Image (tube, helix red, strand yellow):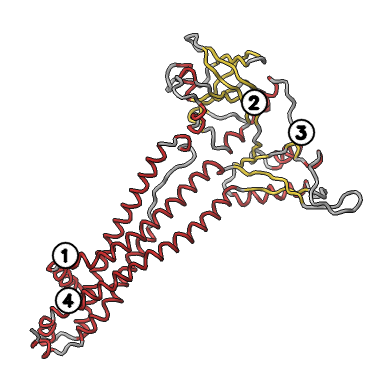
């Protein structure tokens, strides 16, 4: 009951001096809102980068060659030696990897089959390009997102099937509606200078916004050229191209969710394959590790800037101390009456500390709300700016995410400021002589 009474008295005192209380809280509000705004922006930036990295590199690993030195045939140390046929990753290696980890790692390969056209049911000619891709290209990349049906499967590739992935734009061009049932329908594709053949639509992908910038300004929907994706080995068969036996660039996508385990397995596999190679070894690059490094830097920057912003809280605390001293001077007779009626020094001290804490806590709550508002306001401005750059909308996913931990810490810190800066005025009030206080005019 004593604690509740102190809170009631604190609110009563603040209510009787609203303007003064508001001006006193201003330093706390500015300091807390600055901290929350900064932490919200830092947290949001980390979340946005995380989403973007997940879209770009959530499932893939890049297999890279590293020159590790060695001697030439004459015994001289080499600073560099151009890669030779025996240094490259081979198709046989991937086959062994597939045999060791069935369905776990997908090889990303692609080939261009050229451009051509498709005639829709209304006898309109649609411009297209044809690209051979593997399942790894779709699952490991961020460019093509399947929105209906399925992607090109490894079985389509090995069977050299005439399966096709078409864009949502192509569906609208060919069937007259973007919601048309395209799955399972056959289309005749005329590839310039190569052949005219049928493909069965097995899936529809969302045409990437980043590719829309390659359209000529003002081009009509029917004149837009979009890629038709077919199995990689089917593309090689149509173009009479031979499958590569050596690969200069290798990208693997993984179906596993344990990236650390996947990286260790791949390193172990390729270390065994390159154990006899004197010049080159394999490094597995995981793009998500870059995200971890960036996150660490952002955390440090956010904390440092937040601490700098929090210095303004000291100014607010000094204002609280000042106003509490003024309040004690004005209420000297009140303190004297309470002491004459038997109030202990500890009771007087607790009353004024409570009042200082309530003052800072209200300022802290307003500051937190203002900081969240600022964060969302800046986020909306950033989202509007992104609408002016549609080519990046598929890659950058803006996410505004306030930090609950920062809010709780800020509120706790504001209460500590109330206790710290309210202790001296409260102690001074507790030490007042009741007789002198009653005589005070």
Nearest to the observer: residue 299 or residue 304: 304
Q: Nearer the viewer, mark 3 or mark 2?
A: 2
| Earlier residue among tags 1 and 4 | 1
Label located before the other in sequence (3 or 2): 2
Q: Secondary structure at mark 3?
A: loop
Q: Mark 1 or mark 3: which is in front?
A: 1
Q: Which residue is mark 3?
A: 245
Whether residue 363 is visible: yes
Q: Quadrant of the N terminus?
A: bottom left
Where does label 2 land, which residue? 112
- Neighbor class of circle 4 (other Cα within 10 Å; few <14, some 14-19, many 20+) is some
**Residue designated by label 1:** 19
* Residue 392 image offset from top left, x and y in percent: 48, 38
Query: Which quadrant is home to the C terminus?
Result: bottom left
Q: What residue is at 65 percent from the left and 43 percent from the top?
A: 62
Query: Horizontal placement of 118 versus 405: left or right?
Result: right
Secondary element type, mark 1: helix
User: Mark 2 or mark 1, which has the lower sequence index?
Assistant: 1
């Amino acid at each position: 009951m004593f604690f509740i009474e102190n809170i009631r008295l604190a609110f009563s005192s603040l209510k009787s001096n609203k303007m003064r209380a508001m001006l006193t809280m201003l330093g706390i509000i500015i300091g807390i809102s600055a901290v929350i705004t900064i932490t919200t922006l830092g947290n949001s930036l980390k979340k946005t980068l995380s989403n973007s990295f997940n879209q770009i590199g959530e499932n893939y690993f890049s297999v890279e060659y590293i020159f590790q030195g060695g001697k030439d045939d004459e015994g001289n140390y080499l600073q560099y030696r151009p890669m030779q046929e025996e240094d490259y990753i081979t198709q046989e290696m991937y086959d062994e990897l597939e045999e060791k980890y069935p369905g776990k790692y997908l090889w990303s390969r692609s080939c261009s089959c050229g451009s051509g056209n498709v005639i829709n049911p209304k006898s309109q000619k649609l411009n297209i390009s044809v690209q051979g891709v593997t399942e790894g290209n779709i699952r490991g990349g961020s460019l093509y997102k399947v929105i209906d049906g399925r992607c090109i499967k490894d079985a389509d590739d090995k069977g050299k099937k005439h399966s096709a992935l078409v864009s949502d734009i192509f569906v609208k061009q060919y069937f007259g509606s973007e919601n048309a049932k395209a799955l399972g329908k056959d289309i005749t594709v005329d590839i310039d200078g190569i052949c005219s053949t049928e493909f069965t639509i097995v899936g529809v992908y969302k045409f990437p916004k980043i590719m829309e910038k390659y359209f000529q300004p003002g081009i009509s929907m029917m004149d837009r050229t979009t890629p038709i994706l077919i199995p990689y080995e089917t593309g090689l068969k149509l173009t009479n191209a031979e499958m590569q036996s050596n690969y200069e660039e290798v990208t693997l996508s993984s179906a596993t969710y344990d990236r650390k385990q996947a990286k260790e397995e791949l390193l172990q596999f390729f270390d065994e394959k390159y154990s006899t190679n004197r010049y080159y070894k394999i490094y597995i690059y995981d793009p998500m590790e870059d995200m971890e490094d960036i996150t660490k830097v952002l955390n440090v920057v956010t904390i440092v800037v937040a601490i700098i912003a929090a210095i303004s809280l000291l100014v607010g605390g000094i204002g609280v101390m000042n106003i509490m001293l003024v309040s004690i001077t004005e209420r000297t007779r009140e303190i004297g009456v309470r002491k004459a009626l038997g109030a202990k020094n500890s009771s007087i001290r607790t009353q004024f500390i409570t009042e200082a804490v309530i003052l800072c806590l209200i300022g802290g709550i307003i500051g937190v709300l203002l900081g969240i508002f600022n964060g969302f306001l800046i986020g909306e401005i950033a989202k509007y700016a992104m609408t002016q750059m549609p080519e990046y909308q598929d890659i950058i996913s803006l996410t505004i995410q306030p930090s609950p931990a920062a809010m709780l810490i800020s509120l706790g810190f504001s209460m500590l400021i109330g206790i710290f800066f309210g202790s001296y005025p409260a102690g001074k009030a507790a030490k007042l002589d009741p007789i002198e206080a009653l005589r005070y005019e």
